[in-house]
Amino acid sequence: MPLESAPRLDAYGGTGHFASGTIHCPECCVKKPDSKNPQYYHQLLACCLVKPGKKEVLPLMPEPIIQQVDASKNDCEQTALKRLLANIAREHPHLKLVLNFDDLYSDGPTIKLVKSYNYSFIMVAKDTSHLSLYEAVDELDIANKVVRHGYTDEDGYRHWFRFVNGVPINKSHKEILVNYLEYVEISPKGKKYTNTWVTDIYITLENVTKVMRGARAKWKIENETFNTLKTQGYNLEHNYGHGEMHLATNFASLTFTAFLIDQIEQLACPLFQKALSVSKSKKSLWHGIRGLFDWFIIDSWTELLTAITVGKSISLKTLMVDTT
Ligand SMILES: [Zn+2]
């Protein structure tokens, strides 16, 4: 599938949002359940729509990694992925997706699962976990079937590619052929970035840069999503309360919902963009919003964000909260 016809990239990643040695609920997964100090935890498998060159990400509903009914083992990312893809396909049947995965998922069963939904994929493929793939590429290289390509862009970055199409993903799934892409970037200051991916997108000299940029958008799930949710005032890992069954998962889902709304505003609302710029950081913007909510009755988002943008000179059509 050419990348042009599947412009939406969906990056995946798992993260923990609760861990405790004492507090727990029936949905908790448990590490060392038979020991004196079992550890209880909840995780999420998150996925976001990302686009190379765009800072904003749009999260879809994350899939909780929690104790499943009648399960003898802890839930894990791979089984959560099956539920997540079924949910995405059902809720967003019109989306043509290129799914971005890290090396953990880069195997035959995951590729079969992804292709069963007619999605495309780009997966990190480390040499340590793909020995036979790398050997097959080396053999094709000896037979002069591997393409090398390189150029320096207008900002002085050097890009070097080595790719070949139609290589078996591994020995146990020889029938699954993938397209292999090796990449090195050297910045003008000499900083080196390297990575290797496999994809079902047929790689050519014309689209190799686009495939590489799509593959590198994977970092957004760690940086723009988890990092923001943990350090920019969303407090994803805070224990808001564990409840009796679903509370911890529901709080985490609500946090993602708040993040989605903020990302849409950041992407499309000039007033929000201005308020964020004036506040310098998201943490500071949330602080300003909370402060105004504490003291004023706010009629609209426009009024609230305008107050933050222009400061004290705005005349809020509000009443002071009566504390007498
Ligand atoms: Zn729990």
Image (cartoon, grey):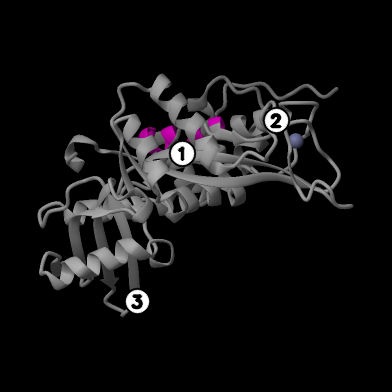
Read off the residue under disc 3: 191
Q: Is residue 279 visible?
A: yes
Cα–Cα gap, marks 3 and 1: 29 Å
Is residue 260 covered in magenta?
Answer: yes
Q: CA distance from mark 2 to mark 3?
A: 50 Å
- Callout 3: CB less than 8 Å from ligand 1: no
Q: Earlier in the sequence, mark 3 or mark 1?
A: 1
Quadrant into which the C terminus falls: top right
In the picture, measured across the screen, residue 220 lies left or right of residue 24, that is left
- The residue shown at (27%, 46%) is 175
- Residue shown at 33% from the left, 63% from the top: 132
Residue at which label 2 appears = 295
Could you say which quadrant of the image residue 271 lies in? top left
Q: Is residue 197 magenta?
A: no
Callout 3 secondary element:
loop
Residue 229 lies, with reference to residue 318, above or below; the image says below
User: What's the magenta region?
Assistant: 257-269
Quadrant of the displayed image that contains ligand 1: top right
Determine the residue positioned at 48% across, 26% down: 302
* First in sequence: mark 2 vs mark 3: 3
In the rendered view, tell whether residue 178 sits above or below residue 257.
Answer: below
Query: What amino acid is found at the position of numbered circle 3 in the picture?
Result: Lys
Q: Residue furthest right?
A: 36
Q: On the image, numbered disc 1 is attached to which residue?
A: 47
